[in-house]
Image: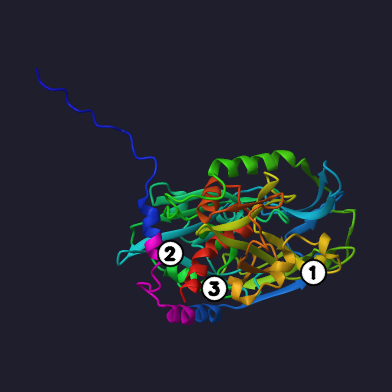
């Protein structure tokens, strides 16, 4: 009797550790196959000089393609696409704390994607020198693709989005990361984007505004002010990580942290309701701004934009302009030799899940300058007056330049001790390891965009730790 023939299995491994190891190897590579960092800066200056970029604020009446909706006062685009500016009412059942504010509603899901390819055995990222009207220096380093659905379906009747086919054609590239992530919960209502990293072996044509960099080169650039944009930072935070913590312990198990976040979300009885922008309590509109009556938080303004390198060369749009520079700081400690970060389960009115993990401190300090210490955000004074010797990482980074004007925050990683940040955390805070934070990022809608920036900057901090 002949032996039975083996039946080929259709099963595949559920997890492939190889991409994470290859990304780690690229993160250790400070020299690229195409550009060194000096050549990159010369290339970036060349791209800055190649196109005219002009942005100025204008009266709302001069917005082209936008209108004020009758009855609500909401700002809408004539196409019915892109985004709208509406009012939001946030109510909190458990005590005081409700508020009203303008909010950006952009229900469509965009693509933020980095295309990677191997050169000389090392993964390189295809990055773009992209102009955004709200960036303080206009041109910043962005992902390969950074486009709303309205952009890439060409509602604006502009040029095609370059390299889009690698992110929309399932056979064109191998997916290394693909996860839906929230955007700024203080300024967007329920907004999220698809964060993607895909790999190709194609012979990719290189357009003028694009360059290849290793993950390590980008980590070096993250140490510079206002160079790597928010969209690139959030995609980088989603990159698969090697399990450097395998076999180690943490102050809290993964299951305990998941329980804590879920339980925190269930306890927060927060409801967000869209309301008309006109007559919004505590806010008023004049010819040039929608602003809070005490001059706090942010303004809504209108802008006229000229950008020779964009799919459309001229347009106008509303932008949110914060009042003052923000701060986003994560306290760090080694607990029995294991690195930990102090995360805050923070409530934001525009988040779909109400609460996400945020930096230890995240606010605009000017909004609290007149308050006594006990009414200021926890750990704010520690972050503002940190001993320079304890600052592992700091840089100024601007937020999403397509919707926010000059929205800049100081990002910090600060070593703390038991007297400053005890192991017995205050309510709403938990010590997590970098690996645990990465696990939450992989799940989507668990870690806010500011904490994801700091996760992306951890590699840059390690470069500083090693000189």
Alpha-carbon distance for marks 3 and 2? 18 Å
Residue 105 in percent (x, y) is at: 72, 51
Residue density around tag 3, few if under 14, some if 14–19, many if 20 or more, within 10 Å: many
Q: In terms of secondary structure, where does tag 1 sit? A: helix
Residue 127 drawn above or below residue 255: below
Q: Nearer the viewer, residue 269 or 293?
A: 269
Mark 1 to mark 3 CA distance (whole Å): 25 Å
> Is residue 424 visible to the viewer in this orientation of the structure?
yes
Q: Earlier in the sequence, mark 3 or mark 2?
A: 2
Residue 210 in view of the camera: no
Q: Quadrant of residue 284?
A: bottom right
- Helix, strand or loop at disc 2? strand
Q: Position of residue 348 (x, y in %)?
A: 73, 51
Which stretch appears magenta? 24-43
User: Which residue is painted at 56% across and 73% down in the image?
Assistant: 227
Tell which of 108 and 435 is nearer to you.
435
Residue furthest to the top in view is 1
Q: Is residue 115 magenta?
A: no
Q: Is residue 127 above or below residue 351?
A: below
Q: Which residue is mark 3?
A: 223
The residue lying at 42 percent from left, 50 percent from top is: 246
Identify the mark nearer the N-term, 1 or 2: 2
Residue that numbered label 1 is attached to: 366
Tell me the CA gap for discs 1 and 2: 38 Å
- The residue labelled by disc 2 is 125
């Amino acid at each position: 009797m002949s032996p039975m023939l083996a039946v080929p299995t259709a099963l595949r491994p559920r997890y492939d550790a190889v991409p994470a190891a290859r990304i780690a190897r690229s993160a250790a590579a400070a020299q690229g196959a195409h550009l060194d960092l000096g050549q990159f800066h010369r290339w970036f200056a060349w791209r800055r000089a190649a196109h005219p970029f002009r942005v100025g604020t204008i009266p709302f009446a001069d917005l082209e393609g936008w209108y004020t909706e009758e009855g609500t006062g909401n700002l809408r685009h004539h196409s019915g696409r892109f985004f709208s500016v509406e009012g939001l009412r946030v109510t909190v059942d458990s005590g005081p704390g409700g508020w009203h504010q303008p909010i950006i509603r952009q229900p469509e899901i965009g693509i933020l994607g980095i295309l990677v390819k191997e050169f000389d055995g090392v993964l390189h990222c295809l990055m773009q020198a992209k102009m955004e009207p709200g960036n303080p220096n206009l041109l910043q380093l962005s992902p390969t693709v950074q486009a709303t659905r309205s952009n890439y379906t060409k509602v604006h009747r502009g040029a095609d989005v370059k390299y889009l086919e690698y992110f929309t054609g399932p056979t064109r590239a191998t997916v290394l990361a693909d996860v839906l992530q929230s955007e700024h919960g203080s300024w967007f209502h329920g907004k999220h984007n698809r964060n993607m990293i895909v790999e190709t072996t194609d012979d990719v044509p290189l357009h003028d505004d694009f360059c290849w960099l290793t993950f390590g080169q980008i980590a070096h650039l993250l140490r510079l002010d206002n160079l790597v944009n928010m969209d690139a930072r959030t995609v980088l935070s989603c990159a698969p990580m090697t399990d450097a913590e395998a076999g180690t312990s943490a102050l809290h198990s993964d299951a305990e942290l998941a329980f804590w976040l879920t339980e925190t979300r269930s306890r927060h009885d927060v409801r967000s309701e869209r309301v008309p922008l006109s007559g919004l309590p505590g806010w008023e509109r004049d010819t040039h701004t929608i602003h809070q009556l005490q001059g706090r938080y942010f303004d809504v303004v209108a802008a006229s934009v000229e950008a020779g390198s964009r799919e459309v060369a001229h347009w106008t749009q509303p932008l949110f302009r914060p009042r003052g520079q923000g701060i986003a700081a994560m306290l760090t400690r080694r607990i029995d030799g294991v690195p930990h970060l102090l995360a805050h389960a923070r409530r934001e009115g525009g988040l779909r899940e109400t609460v996400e993990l945020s930096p230890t401190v995240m606010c605009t300090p000017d909004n609290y300058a007149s308050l006594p210490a006990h009414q200021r955000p926890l750990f704010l004074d520690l972050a503002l007056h940190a001993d320079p010797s304890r600052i592992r990482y700091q840089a100024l980074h601007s937020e999403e330049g397509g919707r926010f004007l000059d929205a800049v925050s100081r990002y910090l990683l600060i070593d703390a001790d038991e007297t400053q940040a005890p192991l017995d955390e205050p309510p709403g805070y938990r010590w997590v390891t970098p690996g645990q934070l990465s696990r939450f990022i992989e799940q989507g809608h668990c870690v806010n965009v500011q904490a994801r920036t700091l996760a992306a900057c951890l590699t840059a901090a390690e470069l500083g730790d090693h000189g």
